[in-house]
Each structure stands twice: as C-alpha cells, then as structure tokens.
Amino acid sequence: MTAPFTGSQHARDTIPGSRLDWLLENLIERTPGARHALVLSRDGLKLCRTPELSEDQADQLAAISAGIQSLSHGASIEFGDGTGGVRQSMTEFYGGILFIVEAGSGAHLAVVATEDADPGMIGHNMNELVEQLSEHLSAPPRHGAEGGHP
C-alpha cells in the first residue's frame, strides 16, 4: 500500500503510485492533443509520469527536458535580464510539440503533445497544475551534485 502524499514529502519520495501520477493523467485527459506528461528533477531524473510512457521513454524524456531547460537557462542569462529565469520552453518537431515549465523548486513538468494541439491551452493547463501543486512539486538536488542551473 502506498503511503498518503503529504506536503512535507518531495516528489522523488512518492514514486511509484503517487497522487501526482493521477494528476498527470488528469492533465492529459482534459487537454486535447496532450499525449504524455512527466515530472522531472532539474538534473534529469524522472519523478513521476503518465503510464503511456515506458520507463526508457520516461528516462529519455527527462534527460531531453533537463537539457533543454539548461540551455534555456543559459540563454536567459546571456540574452535575458541576467537572472537565468525560464518561464517555459516549447520545442516543435515533426509529429509533435514538447512543452516544459518549472514546477516547484528544482523540478520541471514536461508534456508531449500532437503537432496540431493548441499551445495556449496546453500551457494554460500546465501552469494551472503547477500553481495548484507547486509546494509538492519539488526536487532537492542530489547530494554531491554540482552546478546550480537547470
């Protein structure tokens, strides 16, 4: 039996079968065109995912998303206001779109959607979920991990 999710737990401590899993599934169900959702740590570890993503796909999506967020962080420092803040990233590719938003301290929410999905609706629903759960969606850095950027 899975222990109940409490605000004092980190997302990493609630896998598998966490309440975040069903919230991600709900995000996919209520967002036309959304195919997969994943919460990942800043350093690219998957924290929870929708069941349609295999373990390998989730690992790959987490690594890709962490890399994109890291590059976006660098672009923000160099060409933005210098703070390194990244609100969201969107990557269009043949056959789909990848959306990534910050989701609490050290965590990100990634959604893969079909290429004809409405980016405005997906972004809105992702940000709505993050606002509701921001205190629960955190991933402290691993001990011994270096660097301080996404």
Image (cartoon, rainbow, N blue to C red):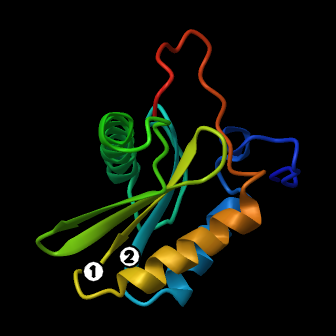
Quadrant of the rendering where the C terminus is positioned:
top left
- Where is residue 19? Give x, y as percent: 74, 62
How crowded is the residue under tag 2: few (<14 C-alpha within 10 Å), some, or many (20+)? many
Q: Amino acid at mark 1?
A: Thr
The residue at the point 53 percent across, 79 percent down is 124
Residue designated by label 2 = 35
Q: Amino acid at mark 2?
A: Arg
- Where is residue 74? Give x, y as percent: 33, 34
Residue designated by label 1 = 114
**For residue 92, what is the image quadrant?**
bottom left
The residue at the point 56 percent across, 9 percent down is 144
Q: Nearer the viewer, residue 9 or 72?
A: 72
**For residue 100, what is the image quadrant?**
bottom left
138 to 131, vertically: above or below: above
Element type where label 2 sits in the image? strand
- Where is residue 21? Give x, y as percent: 63, 63
For this view, does 30 lie left or right of residue 129? Answer: left
Disc 1 + disc 2, Cβ < 8 Å: yes
Residue positioned most to the top: 144
The residue at the point 22 percent across, 73 percent down is 96
How crowded is the residue under tag 1: few (<14 C-alpha within 10 Å), some, or many (20+)? some
Element type where label 1 sits in the image? loop
Alpha carbons under labels 1 and 2: distance apart: 7 Å
Mark before the other along the chain sequence, 1 or 2: 2
The residue at the point 62 percent across, 14 percent down is 143
